[in-house]
Image (spheres, helix red, strand yellow):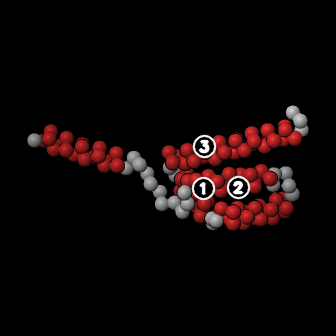
Amino acid sequence: MKTKFILIILCLFTSYACKNDKIELDLNYSNQKIIAVTVDLYIAGSAIQGLDELVADSLIEVYRSQIEIIHDVDIGLIEADIESLHAYPSLYKPIHKDILDSLSKLDKEVLIKTNNLNGK
């Protein structure tokens, strides 16, 4: 009887644990939207590197507002989503990988176009 009780408790615990393996966050935006916006934010950040700090600060605000308009998002909510995702590496890592893959693909496309323009 005691063994049966322990087995039932073990089965219930295992069942409960399996149900909680899939983490679902209540994000403001879809993963695809977060990826697209983050890629554009990386590009904007890259565009201001090496500029005077005052100019860079002004430009990043312009870029951020343009990105909000282009993607129809609130950057603050995107940042909140990213912060929420950071707490769960199993959810964040695939998104971050997609961001890096997108940036790498764009970088290769620019390099090819640049080489074509330079006759290489």
Task: Tell me which numbered mark, 1 or 2, is placed earlier along the sequence.
Answer: 1
Q: Secondary structure at mark 2?
A: helix
Residue reaching furthest left?
1
Q: CA distance from mark 3 to mark 1?
A: 12 Å
Q: Residue at x 84, y 38 (%)?
A: 116
In the image, 24: left or right of 48? Answer: left
Q: Are the residues at dot 1 and dot 2 in contact (C-beta closer than 8 Å)? A: no
Q: Residue at x 66, y 45 (%)?
A: 102
Q: Residue at x 65, y 42 (%)?
A: 101
Q: CA distance from mark 1 to mark 2?
A: 10 Å
Q: Secondary structure at mark 1?
A: helix
Q: Are the residues at dot 3 and dot 1 in contact (C-beta closer than 8 Å)? A: no
Q: Nearer the viewer, residue 69 or 22?
A: 69
Identity, as a three-letter code, of the amino acid under mark 2: Leu
Total labels: the figure holds 3
Q: Which label number is shown at residue 97?
A: 3
Quadrant position of residue 62:
bottom right
Q: Nearer the viewer, residue 65 or 16?
A: 65
Q: Residues within 10 Å of mark 3 (few under 14, many from 20)?
A: few
Task: Tell me which numbered mark, 3 or 1, is placed earlier along the sequence.
Answer: 1
